[in-house]
Image (cartoon, rainbow, N blue to C red):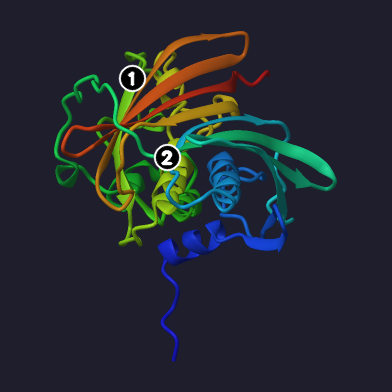
Amino acid sequence: MNEPLTPLDELLGLLDLEQIEENIFRGTTSHPTLVPRVFGGQVAAQALVAAGRTVPGDRPAHSLHSYFLRPGDPAVPIVYTVDRIRDGRSFTTRRVVAVQHGQPIFHLSASFQAHEEGLEHQEPMPAAPDPLSLPTAAEMLPAYTDLLGGPEVVQRILDTRDAVDLRYVDAPPFASVGEVREPKSQVWFRTNGKLDDDWLLHVCLATYVSDMTLLDSVLFAHGRGGWAVGDVVGASLDHAMWFHRPFRADEWLLYDQESPTAQGGRGLARGRIFTADGRLAVSVIQEGVVRVPRG
């Protein structure tokens, strides 16, 4: 008798794209979300998988730049077409278009680099408590059941993140509605289970998680609770990441996030992902729609 799939198994299956032609891949399922569209982190991670499948294994990704063009339909497979822009001696460049219903919903450009030695420095890791001293989502969320609209909503939130152990250092936006705070936030995260050593898998899982909480810092500056309580409408517009140093997504990573500005119905957020031993592994920048509902 086969063992039931774990949430991490299901997420890994989500990222294991079907190759239907040379340079063409298909994602057959979508992860559940709180809103009727595909989670942006899923599309970005799947697009990076498609790009990485066409690159030699000794060239890990060092950056990606992407735009979200249309909401993804969670009921329909997403097709990813890869354009092999350049294969140089040191760098490899790929462009990926995600398509549904005959229309592009997402564009990604990614660059991969062969290993080389060079100058090195980094910002120091900010202070943060031990992740094991913080409550899990399953321990924290039930306290906000009424605020979030009932146990069904709490369970849906847990279902969207069940493959990842994500722990807030401070209260999330929906727990501090009306409280204007410094536009900064921190979370620790790791996958709920061990992963293979494939570098592409770890980078793509970090890409997936990086879209979960980044715009929270925008909300803190205005005392807004976010999409979970309906006092703002939001969606990712673009997303960029730079992968500086090797890391494992199944080991604790600190995601330090802040928002320098919001204007015109848009908010900008940037993040830094550190390994538990203090190495700056990833830098992230995203702009998103952040609108106050009318009426």
For mark 2, give the secondary structure.
loop
Q: Is residue 140 above or below residue 22?
A: above
- The residue drawn where x is 46% and y is 30% is 241
Badge 2 amino acid: Ala
Residue 228 seen in the current view: no
Residue 206 appears at what percent x and percent y?
41, 43
Lower position in the chain sequence, tag 1 or tag 2 = 2
Q: Which labelled disc corresponds to residue 114?
A: 2
Q: Nearer the viewer, residue 220 or 19?
A: 19
Q: Nearer the viewer, residue 166 or 84?
A: 84
Left or right: 128, with 70 as reference point: left
Residue furthest out toward the front: 89
Q: Nearer the viewer, residue 153 or 215?
A: 215
Within-10-Å neighbours for mark 2: few <14, some 14–19, many 20+: some
Q: Nearer the viewer, mark 1 or mark 2?
A: 2
Residue 59 appears at what percent x and percent y?
45, 44
Residue identified by numbered label 1: 184
Mark 1 touching mark 2, by CB under 8 A? Answer: no
Residue 34 appears at what percent x and percent y?
56, 45
Badge 1 amino acid: Lys
Q: Which labelled disc corresponds to residue 213?
A: none
- The residue drawn where x is 34% and y is 34% is 116
Q: Nearer the viewer, residue 189 or 121?
A: 121
Q: Quadrant of the C terminus?
A: top right
Within-10-Å neighbours for mark 1: few <14, some 14–19, many 20+: many
Left or right: 182, with 226 as reference point: left
For mark 1, give the secondary structure.
strand
